[in-house]
Amino acid sequence: MKHFAITDVGMVRELNEDTYLVKEYGDATLLAVFDGMGGANAGETASAIARDEVEKYFTSFFENFGRTEPAAVQAALASAADRANFKIFSLASADKEYEGMGTTMVAALCISDKVYVANIGDSRAYLIDKDGAYQITRDHSFVQYLVDIGKLTPEEARNSSQKNIITRAVGVDKEVSVDVSVIEQKQYKGKTLLLCSDGLSNYIGNGMLCDLCKAHKTPEEFAKVLVATANEAGGHDNITAVVAKLK
């Protein structure tokens, strides 16, 4: 599997509170994006903790457990999120400097003939082919809730001043719920997987994602042009993209 990851501070922020994880475990590949939030450097701390905890969890999982049946992999993604949530919440509860910090998480574990996608918050996963870009994850956000109950259209949600209010994050509460979905090979074969923070998705719609993917064939070219496009559109947030070509 060919993949590439990039993160950029953007055009406005002084700190980059995003981070990413790309790790191979034999035939398995783990990809993830984390978008931190909180005062001072708390967001940067939260996203780094989440990245490190997820990486440590799966290193142990593949070394000591290594089961690849769907139920075990789905449970492992949820457990990794729980571990990160506990570590961040504990630090935030013990130290006023980190009070209220948290992070989004979107992760994809590519193993055997399946891709397992887990998300908390509004960082997203997309599958992209020549016919379009399709969002795999569902945002845990206030505007998504308003869309769900019919108070906003998707386009109104995209342009809403409240679009950055998330309803779920890693580390904010004592417990967190993670959504995990499974994508079969027949659904993803030959497509491009994109994981990104909202600093990218807020600026680039599905149509443009598809067009840019068709024009820039390699993961590196595609990821870099996504960051450049988001910056050209304003770059008001940190921007992170992890791209993989699926077989």
Image: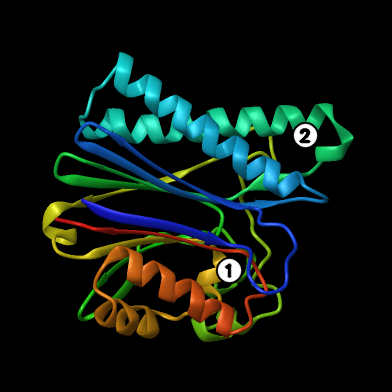
Q: Percent x, y for residue 61? A: 35, 22
Point 88% across, 35% down: residue:
96
From the viewer's perspective, is residue 154 above or below residue 186? below
In the picture of the structure, the residue carrying the numbered disc 2 is 92
* Residue 122 lies in quadrant: bottom right
In the picture of the structure, the residue carrying the numbered disc 1 is 199
The disc placed on residue 43 is none
Q: Percent x, y for residue 146? A: 59, 72
The residue mark sitting in front, 1 or 2, is 1
Mark 2: amino acid? Ala
Question: Can residue 148 be seen in the rendering of this structure?
Answer: no
- Mark 2: give few (<14), some (14-19) or many (20+) Cα within 10 Å: many
**In the displayed structure image, the side of residue 210 where residue 16 appears, left or right:** right
What residue occupies the far right of the structure in this picture? Answer: 96
Point 63% across, 28% down: residue:
86
From the viewer's perspective, is residue 156 above or below residue 61? below
Question: Can residue 22 be seen in the rendering of this structure?
Answer: yes
From the viewer's perspective, is residue 53 above or below residue 223? above
Report the front residue among 229 and 91.
229
Mark 1: amino acid? Gly
**In the displayed structure image, the side of residue 186 where residue 24 appears, left or right:** right
